Image (tube, rainbow, N blue to C red):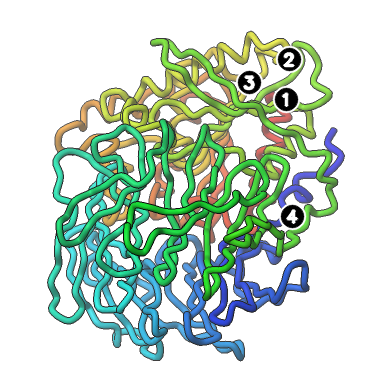
Amino acid sequence: MAAYDIERYLNIRSALGASFGPDGDRLSFRMDTTGVDQVWTLAGPGRWPEQRTFFEERVTFASWSPERPDLIFGMDEGGNERAQLYRLDDDGRITNLTARPDAKHRWGGWSHDGERFAFASNRREEAVFDVYVQGRDETGDEATLVREGDGWLSLAGWSPDDSRLLVVESHASFDQDLYTLDLETDAFEHLTPHEGDVRYRSASWAPDGEGIYLVTDEGADTLYLAYLDLETRELETVVDGNGWNVDGIALDDETGRFVYSRNVDGYTALTVGEFDADEPTSFETFPEPDLPAGVAGGVSFDPDAERFACSATGDLDNANVYVVDVETGETERWTRAPTAGIPRETFDESELVRIESFDGLEIPGFFAVPDDAEDGGTPVIVDIHGGPESQRRPSFSGVEQYYLDRGYAYFEPNVRGSSGYGTEYASLDDVEKRMDSVADIAACVEWLREHPAVDPDRIACKGGSYGGFMVLASLTEYPDLWAAGVDVVGIANFVTFLENTGDWRRKLREAEYGSLAEDRDFLEEISPINNVEKIEAPLFVLHGANDPRVPVGEAEQIVEEARERGVPVRKLIFEDEGHGFSKLDNRIEANAAVADFLDEHV
């Protein structure tokens, strides 16, 4: 029996998404004290924070104006992902800047003078994102359409003189292009012509506006930091990841100071430095910040780039905002997100393990065993990430700590297809190789069954989104391995999923899963809905009614088929949620129900 119930663990708070105010004396950040992320501000380390927004819906980002004490934040409704942009003035007044609830709006940043901001939106056509520029005091249809897209456009920021925008076009998860858009001449210059799939991402303008810093895997298996000269179009390596991905770079385009991150076996390694003004690929580095071992990101420089803020989390540390002195590396935690009265020393740490799969490929994963685990008597939860271009990393999870406290072991695999281990590894599950990743799960379970602490008859799987598909596929392909399965907003039928997912996502998803036109028979073959009769373990299906990514019909059809086949199945649908559960009351209800289900069957 756990010392604390699931509600206590779900009340462990997170503080993240920091942004320095224009005077450098305040930070904004997001914290879920009310149950969903809202905007808070803070005037110093450990000081009492002030809540600035009070909505029932989650705030997805917040960004200070570079010149005024107001900020812009994003928020959708009921998980529908059709985010609107709002301005929060210093006096607390809030203005809906976009006022187009039928469309998605993707933030593109403030101009340096704070007079304008940019965003991408699918207002004109649902499957296409265009680029807009809007004055800070304009609203709704007063935004100016500056570039019509024919696919998925997003923005990477304004040039130092505010005359151009850096535009990203995504063709697939592992294939992007970069362009510059001249706001005076409308010239749209393609910077990265290439063949095949190449990633160009995390792009930032150089201080002189004559080049771009970015991470790319052009000619390599892993992402590296590069400099692109805008005149010669020459791409030059700045930092090689040494076998690991350079995940991204944050750059102050006035001073050339930067922070770049590497993903080393799931752990974040930050490098802080300053580029040479005369030689853009040369730089000096400063001492590393002292952050919790785990995952860090969301860098925001103060106005003089003397400090930066970021959020950090680890197995034993819930997410908090830290401020780092650029030159000394001195690190100070500014937020005090509470742990709901649960002592930090009760949290358990995971171990990085590697498991050989059916074809000899090594599958990394994070495995945590409760301190009081009995030999051969410990049940296990195998928690499978979504994506599939995602990665389990050593970040804090209140749900995981709850199960560890209840006596479960917890295993989080990064099967083939996961990001973080190179382009080749990520492509090993594409289209016709899809079920190889499910075979990886089976290999991991066989490894768990041999572990001295594990009860081989009490292993359950759970996962969300694509991870929900992996749960259903694991239950149908390897039915004798499982005591129970939990599918959260998962894909049951690839054909109906692709037919019904948001128009703006279909092309990107077909690049990963296969197309309806060319691969329909294969998609039918591997869809769990067509193999339900093989399921032997009890199944719990949870979904959000407003899910624009994996429509709720995926849950309805798998439940109906499972019941007709005599599979013990439970269903829980939330009418005010989308792709996952953001509201605290819903998360408590969902996780309490899952805990009861696993206690009953595992």
Determine contact: label 1, label 4, CB under 8 Å: no
Determine contact: label 1, label 2, CB under 8 Å: yes
Q: CA distance from mark 4 to mark 3?
A: 27 Å
Viewer-nearest of labels 1 and 4?
Answer: 1
Viewer-nearest of labels 3 and 2?
Answer: 2
Secondary element at tag 1: loop
Q: Which mark is residue 459?
A: 3
Q: Is residue 370 left or right of residue 251?
A: right
Q: CA distance from mark 3 to mark 2?
A: 12 Å
162 or 133: nearer the viewer: 162
Secondary element at tag 3: strand
Q: Is residue 477 above or below residue 560?
A: above
**At which x and y percent is residue 529?**
38, 30
Viewer-nearest of labels 4 and 3?
Answer: 4
| Amino acid at circle 3 | Ile
Query: Reading the chain from its start, which is encountered first: label 1 or label 3?
Result: 1
- Quarter of the image for residue 309 reads bottom right
Q: Is residue 214 left or right of residue 345?
A: left
Which residue was labeled with disc 1? Answer: 369
Determine contact: label 4, label 2, CB under 8 Å: no
Residue 392 makes an appearance in the image: yes
- Quarter of the image for residue 15 reads bottom right
Q: CA distance from mark 1 to mark 2?
A: 8 Å
Which residue was labeled with disc 2? Answer: 453
What's the residue at 29%, 43% (across, down)? 509
What's the residue at 77%, 73% (across, down)? 48
Which residue was labeled with disc 4? Answer: 11
What's the residue at 24%, 59% (across, down)? 127
